[in-house]
Image (cartoon, rainbow, N blue to C red):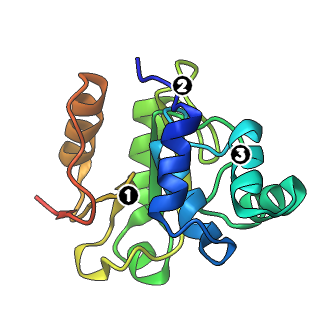
Amino acid sequence: MEKTLTDDQKKEIIHKNGGRKENILAILLDLQSASPDGYVDLQTAALVAGELDITESRVYEIASYYAMLQIRPQARYVLEVCNSSPCRFSKSEAVVHILEQELDIGVGQSTSDGLFALRFTPCVGACDSGPVIKIGDAVYGNLDEKKIRSIIAGLRAGHTLFRKGENHDR
């Protein structure tokens, strides 16, 4: 199980991003990414407010405004299916159907074990590989039923995800 970040570790992330309120979005994204539960909690928001000399309500307002920031604990793996026009054209609905069957949840829901969540996302910039699923920072493209089931089986088995920015259309 992953350990919660200490205040010192959080402060290191804040200052690595310049430690200024102009950088709050980058700071919150990095803090969320480092959080084992994938969200910005109230304690972290309070720490950011103190370090940046802004109000806690302003930090929370920013964290709750941007779709890429979460203010509630997230599933370990958030599977985001691109629902842009090119991906819909390349059958993203079929991907959603397979994922709903495999995970026994609908879009906007999480599995009871907290391992998976399924949601739509706007374009991820991999139109040439559609349909795609984004999991964390990894993009999996050219999906078919076999690839999707293999990805899910791998995650269930604890296999690590690919590194940030890699596009995987194997």
Instruction: State the residue position of label 1.
Output: 134
Query: The disc labelled 3 sits on which kind of residue?
Result: Leu
Separation of marks 1 and 3 at Cα, in angstroms: 30 Å
Precedes in sequence: disc 2 or disc 3 = 3
Residue located farthest toward the left when viewing the structure as drawn: 170
Q: Secondary structure at mark 3?
A: helix
Kindly identify the residue that appears in the image at 68 percent across and 72 percent down.
Answer: 21
57 shown above or below 65: above
Query: The disc labelled 2 sits on which kind of residue?
Result: Gly
Mark 1 or 3: the one toward you: 3
Kindly identify the residue that appears in the image at 24 percent across and 81 percent down.
Answer: 128
Mark 2 or 3: the one toward you: 3
Precedes in sequence: disc 1 or disc 3 = 3
The image quadrant of residue 168 is bottom left
Front residue (pair 118, 56): 56
Front residue (pair 65, 60): 60
Q: Secondary structure at mark 1?
A: strand
Kindly identify the residue that appears in the image at 33 percent across and 67 percent down.
Answer: 131
Other-residue count near label 2 (Cα within 10 Å), few / some / many at <14 / 14–19 / ≥20: some
Instruction: State the residue position of label 3.
Output: 47
Other-residue count near label 1 (Cα within 10 Å), few / some / many at <14 / 14–19 / ≥20: many
Instruction: State the residue position of label 2.
Output: 114
Quadrant location of the C terminus?
Answer: bottom left
Q: Residue 6's spot in the image, x, y percent? A: 54, 31
Precedes in sequence: disc 1 or disc 2 = 2
Q: Residue 28's spot in the image, x, y percent? A: 60, 58
Separation of marks 2 and 3 at Cα, in angstroms: 27 Å
Query: What is the tally of numbered marks visible in this picture?
Result: 3
